[in-house]
Image (cartoon, grey):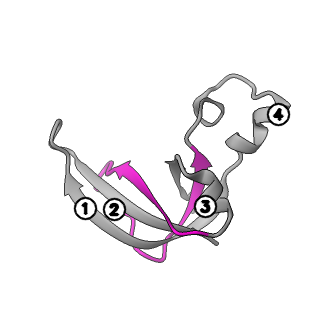
Amino acid sequence: MEKQEVKIKNYQEYIEGMEVEATVEVKNNKIIRPGERVMVFKDSMAASSPIPVPREKQHQAIGVEGVVTGTEIRESDKSGSLIQILKLMKG
């Protein structure tokens, strides 16, 4: 089963084992539940670019598996789409 990809800004804290939050848009009514495993990436150009990543930036483009420890669903003010706030821990 393919894991959901999640990008976070506080990647270093995540790598150090702290619980962090990520915001994802709910697509195709696919809600992520506590206990699910996800692939976590640093929110950077290296992680979102189709261009080959220079060696010194590759650590930013490598996903590290994590587990969802909590979730909250909100409605976006702008588009009306559902936004899910995830709490994640490296695992």
Residue 64: % across, % down: 67, 58
- State left or right for residue 67 relative to residue 76: right
Q: Residue 65: which quarter of the image? A: bottom right
Which callout, 4 or 1, points at the residue further toward the start of the chain?
A: 4
Residue type beneath disc 3: Tyr
Which is in the foreground here, disc 3 or disc 1?
A: 3
The residues tagged by marks 4 and 1 sit, at their Cα atoms, a distance apart of 36 Å
* Image quadrant occupied by the N terminus: bottom right
Q: Secondary structure at mark 2?
A: loop
- Residue beneath the point at 52% across and 49% down: 8
Numbered range of the magenta stretch: 18-42
Q: Are marks 1 and 2 in contact (CB under 8 Å)?
A: yes
Which residue is labeled 1 in the image?
73
Residue type beneath disc 1: Ile
- Compared with 81, 70 (above or below) is below
The residues tagged by marks 3 and 4 sit, at their Cα atoms, a distance apart of 20 Å
Which is in the foreground here, disc 1 or disc 2?
A: 1
Which residue is labeled 4 in the image?
56
Residue 88: % across, % down: 50, 66
Which callout, 4 or 2, points at the residue further toward the start of the chain?
A: 2
Which residue is labeled 3 in the image?
14
Q: Secondary structure at mark 4?
A: helix
- Compared with 76, 4 (above or below) is below
Which callout, 3 or 1, points at the residue further toward the start of the chain?
A: 3
- Residue 40 part of the magenta segment: yes
Which residue is labeled 2 in the image?
31
The residues tagged by marks 1 and 2 sit, at their Cα atoms, a distance apart of 9 Å
Residue type beneath disc 2: Ile
The residues tagged by marks 3 and 2 sit, at their Cα atoms, a distance apart of 22 Å
